Image (cartoon, rainbow, N blue to C red):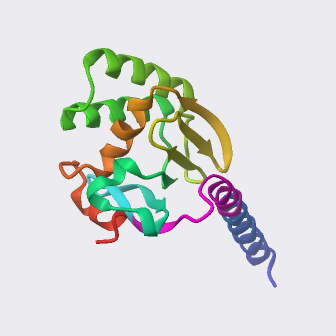
Amino acid sequence: MQPGMRRICFLLFLSLSTLLSTALANSVVLKQVLPEATVIGSGSFRWFGLKLYDASLWAVRSSFNSDNWQSTPLALELNYARSLEGRRIAEASIDEMKKLGIGTSAQHKAWDEAMKQVFPDVDKTTQLTGLYVPGQPTRFFRNGSPVGEITDPAFGAAFFAIWLHPKTTAPKLRSALLGQ
């Protein structure tokens, strides 16, 4: 094998092993916090044609109801396809909540500050997972490791509504996540 080809094979192996270890770490976390959860649906989010991330929604299928998702523990995995700053992710999340008419201006301010403390910068090797359990803090994980939580019990439903509300700005992704 030529030296250039060896290097390409090595880099490919390294990339695949990184992706596999991230997926395994995250599935271990999901199995610990939602042991009976399975993927309800998945899809990609694009902005002006650029893929930002792939998303998967996890829940216990037997108790999941797409019309009443707020009453069920859920996990949302986002596998990023490009680099983004955590603060920009927080700002975009608040913009989406405002478009949906969810939360007050005081809540938006508090949630924005909290997300900016929790959300890390991401790149194409990053998987962020949000865990929603009704009435509990919303917890976030980066590549399977905890990065923080937002304690306001109203935040979780507001945050997950970005993807699951009937009036989301990404209706195709919503349908894919809900397995429709």
User: Magenta includes 34?
Assistant: yes
Among the 4 quarters of the image, the one containing residue 45: bottom left
Q: Report the front residue among 52 and 24.
A: 24
**Left or right, 140 with reference to 73:** right
For this orientation, the residue located farthest to the bottom is 1
**Left or right, 3 with reference to 150:** right
Residue 65 drawn above or below residue 129: below
Q: Measured from the top left, where is residue 158 in percent x and y?
A: 34, 37
Badge count:
0
Q: Measured from the top left, where is residue 115 in percent x and y?
A: 48, 28
Q: Quadrant of the C terminus?
A: bottom left
User: Magenta includes 39?
Assistant: yes
Q: Report the front residue among 16 and 105.
A: 105
In this orientation, does residue 40 appear?
A: no
What residue is shown at x 81% (from left), y 85% (from top)? 1
Tell me the magenta residue range.
23-42
Q: Report the front residue among 12 and 87.
A: 87
Residue 96 drawn above or below residue 143: above
What residue is shown at x 48% (from left), y 61% (from top)? 59
Q: Measured from the top left, where is residue 5 in percent x and y?
A: 74, 77
Residue 6 drawn above or below residue 151: below
